Image (cartoon, rainbow, N blue to C red):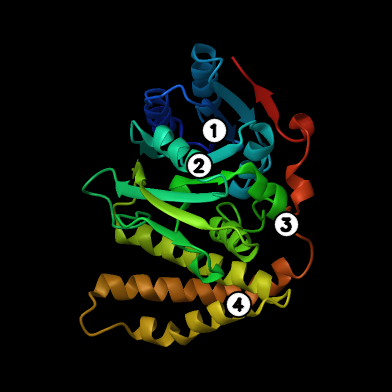
Amino acid sequence: MKISIVICTRNRAASLTQTLQSLLALRWTGAYEREIVIVDNGSTDATRATLEQFAAQHPETLRYVYEPRTGLSRARNTGIRESTGEVIAFTDDDVLVAPDWCDEMHREFAADPQLCMLGGRILLAREDLQPVTFKTDERRRTFHSPHDFNEVYGANTAFRRRLFETVGGFDVRLGAGCFHASGEEADVVYRGLSGGFHLLYAPNVVVHHDHGRTTLEQVLRLEYGYGKGLSGFTMKHILRGDRTALRILWWSLEGWLRRWRGKPEDSRDLQRRSRAHCHGILAGLLLAPFYFAFGDGETKPSSIAKTRSSSGSTVAG
């Protein structure tokens, strides 16, 4: 088995350096092959120079790929096409992986040939960070229902390649760099669960997330984006006649007023977060029909099965 670690980055040379250092320090049992593919999504800072230096020092492990078309989903699709592993693991450019991260991931996929979607535990890297984009659940769980689309987060996920060859890649109309600024991972997992694949949450696969958000205002922008992503990804499937997505959106809207008002015991900050999320849902709903009524957003399996030189440019060493 070969594991391809894909990281998409844009103008984050400093944090990316720390991420790469943690990846290159990973323990490795030698029972599998591995590679690191870094997709530079149009950076204008020192990212290219930083990555070329790392690639020169580790030419057999690390490859630098340039994707000029902005958008996290586009960059991830490029990473899938450029990688060669049976398993494709994604983490972010502000993450520090645990020393056994890759070994534990390999152990899970090797133990279950039918496993095609995996998510792991995400801990906060610093005490001063706002409590967002983390998952500390220590229960090992397997999910089969499309309703469980939101049980894993993009900072620590892995997919067997045949999942993308079956359900297609990331929707380029979702995720960072788009109006619907999130929901791209949820959309892939939802399509996988709807297609009969199961999802494993493995708390032994651990990363530490240094997301950099220390103020409430930063969190409110994040919650607004989450709301837009939720309405965007569900409306996409609703427009195709998907009743499960319709129920998910309905339940979200049903709880909208409760979240807006907040509970008496909720803090003012939590109420503001809920309202930002709800604003995002409404904004996403208003524009989703225009974004998702036509096209497939590069989510057809054929969009992933392209040759390596079909998009982006590769610089190795």
Frontmost of labels 3 and 4 is 4
Q: Which residue is mark 3?
A: 297
Q: Secondary structure at mark 3?
A: loop
Q: What is the x, y in percent for residue 23?
A: 42, 28
Whether residue 241 is visible to the viewer of this picture, yes or no, is yes
Describe residue 263's horizontal placement relative to residue 312 as left or right.
left
CA separation in Å, label 3 and label 4? 20 Å
Pointer 2 and pointer 4: residues touching (CB < 8 Å)?
no
Pointer 2 and pointer 1: residues touching (CB < 8 Å)?
yes
Q: Which one is in front, 253 or 216?
A: 253
Q: Which one is in front, 44 or 120?
A: 120
Q: Which residue is mark 1?
A: 3
Q: What is the x, y in percent for residue 296?
A: 76, 60
Q: Residues within 10 Å of mark 4 (few under 14, many from 20)?
A: some
**The N terminus: image quadrant:** top right
Amino acid at dot 3: Gly
CA separation in Å, label 3 and label 1? 26 Å
Describe residue 121's horizontal placement relative to residue 308 as left or right.
left
Frontmost of labels 3 and 2 is 2
Q: Which residue is mark 4?
A: 244
User: Which sits earlier in the primary sequence, circle 2 or circle 1?
Assistant: 1
User: Which sits earlier in the primary sequence, circle 1 or circle 4?
Assistant: 1
CA separation in Å, label 2 and label 1? 10 Å
Q: Which residue is mark 2?
A: 109
Q: Which mark is residue 15?
A: none
